[in-house]
Image (spheres, rainbow, N blue to C red):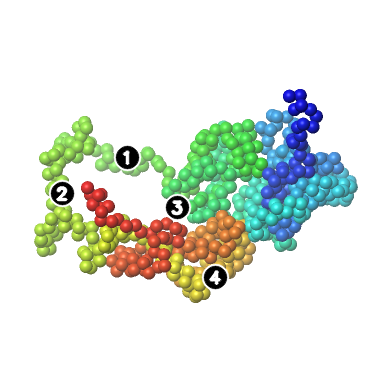
Amino acid sequence: MLKFFEEGAVSDVIQLLSDHLANQIAAGEVIQRPASAVKELLENAVDAGATDIQLVIKDAGKELIQVIDNGKGMSPTDARMSFERHATSKIRSIEDLFSIRTMGFRGEALASIAAVAQVEMKTKPEHAELGSRICIEGTEVKLQEPCATATGTNILVKNLFFNVPARRHFLKSNTTELRHIIDEFTRVALANPGVGFRLRNNNTEQFHLEPGNMKTRIVGLLGNAYEKNLVPAEQQTDLLTINGFIGKPEAATRTRGMQFFFINNRFIRNAYLHHAVAAAYEGLIEKESFPFYVLFLETDPGRVDVNVHPTKQEVKFDDEKMMYAYLNAAVKHSLARYNIAPSLDFSLNREITQLESVNRPQTDEQVTQTQRNYLFNAFAHKNQAHFIDRNDGLQRWKELYAIAHQPAAGSPSAPEQSRGDNLLDQAFEHKPGNGAGILLVQGSLLVTTVKSGLMVIHIRRAQERIWYERLLQEWNNGQTPSQQLLFPVTYELPPHDALLLSGVLQDLSRIGFDIAPFGANTFVVQGVPAALPSGEEKNVLDEVIDQLRHEAPDAVAQRPDRLLMQLAKRLSRNKHALQQPEGQQALIDELFACTQPEYAPDGKRIFSMLRKEALDDLLG
């Protein structure tokens, strides 16, 4: 036992991490991609009281991220301390942690950026003669000296992840990374309409936003198409204050991304609150569509915990159900107030209440006649509402059935048929021989007889398979027909979506679209695939953009196949040809001429067999 505790018998394995390694681990949580650094730097500039902020990007932020602001700047000591972990001016006590209204407050941003990049910062307070210049590389301070600079802060982040090659290797394409940067820029700019913002990407100015009101900022960021579709939303309660804009139903899109929630001016994601808004649009937009909104919720900071995630985009609420109710009511009220959704009014119009027919009392004769009525007796007696007398009630149904089947006046009498024959004639619109025994069920299924029993075919999936194989053959032959539009359609997009569409114009051209850039973030659609119904081009492009948003980085090779699948879905919505038996038979013939008739392009089954033995078992 004594030998076990002798010196050197057991080696120590637990050690403290070095500051350099600890900073790199922290940077992995806070700085995941160039957009993460952009977010932190922009929020720091806003917290510094800046009224004009410039963002300069090169190589999608991999080479350079520069943020220039005219805020209050920092002293030499503060400038050096700002790069230390957990160095912050926002928190002095635990109480401060639960009453925070500023953006950054944990003091990790600059330290995390400096751990994985080469950073240079120039900063000067308003009344100082000289500012400070600091150069840091991988947490190591290379230089700190006085310098001449403008009031505010100018920070450059160069060669992000230069000392973490694995992290840099996992960055996506420049288009994807730039889209994430624009997303972060959009959120910060929306939250601060009184601040001027500029964004330059590779020496090209993407945005120049002057200080203004919220509506001007939304239009400047997202495009002029939103100007006529904005509806103000306002609600003030003891718990919650709601301000912002929601979109008219026609502004709804089939893609996510145009939904913005801000809690105490901080952008958040919350599926529960999104459901509150979406529920208010029920019946106004299609189920698969997403409403547009930019909503600012103000509440006591003590009711919200913003420190549950490193990015601070996920929060916890003290009373989620109450906030849901207030938000849902506010959106409904705005839709009704601007005559977008009908509001219920249970009071009768005065003109109606003054009518003689409403005010005149019933005569005794009218009362007696009403009381003799069959329906009055059925509902006037207790437990009679759903009861049919075996003799009287059945006799009335027989009379009704007989009246319904009486031949029209002047028409020849129909020969007597059994009830089963009559139902058979009604079920099969065309008797076997003329319609080949095909039955159309509720407009979505075809049932036909085969040797072993019945086959049930899903119409839409069958059409998708047929169209997909047609389009694939045209794609491989390079001969997809295009129909030029008599009146070209303008298609305006938010900046990040315009980047995505620009990257697939060549692929879209190969499936029949003729689309050309038409100014900043705007495209003109001059031609569409020949078989595409009129007005469907926007829906197809919306779905393509949504697909690109969620595309895996290694899915570029599969992109043409997915484009063909999206187009096949849109082309498969024509049901008019299936009302006639010839069209139904043609669908079945074309389906079984396909190379893979059993499955739709998305892998779902197209048809199923019901064998005669199973039908016998079903009927006992």
Mark 3 Cα shell of 10 Å, populated few (<14), some (14-19), many (≥20): some
Q: Earlier in the sequence, mark 4 or mark 2?
A: 2
Q: Earlier in the sequence, mark 1 or mark 4?
A: 1
The reply to whether the C-beta atoms of the residues labelled 4 and 2 are less than 8 Å apart is no
Q: Say which of marks 1 and 2 sits in front.
A: 2
In the rendered structure, find residue 509 and report the number of the disc placed on it: 4
Instruction: Name the image quarter holding residue 65.
Output: bottom right
The reply to whether the C-beta atoms of the residues labelled 3 and 2 are less than 8 Å apart is no
Q: The residue under label 2 is which amino acid type?
A: Leu
SS at badge 2:
helix
> Disc 3 to disc 2, how far (Cα)?
40 Å
> Disc 1 to disc 3, how far (Cα)?
38 Å
Q: Nearer the viewer, residue 357 or 563?
A: 563
- Residue 266 in sight: no
In the rendered structure, find residue 286 and report the number of the disc placed on it: 3
Name the spot of residue 116 as percent of width and height, x first. 75, 49
Q: The residue under label 1 is which amino acid type?
A: Thr
Which residue in the structure is indicated by mark 1? 353
Q: Say which of marks 4 and 2 sits in front.
A: 4
The reply to whether the C-beta atoms of the residues labelled 1 and 4 are less than 8 Å apart is no
Instruction: Name the image quarter holding residue 20.
Output: top right
- At 16% from the left edge and 55% from the top edge, which residue is drawn? 420
Q: Is residue 472 above or below residue 201?
A: below
Q: Earlier in the sequence, mark 3 or mark 2?
A: 3
SS at badge 1:
helix
Q: Nearer the viewer, residue 275 or 557?
A: 557
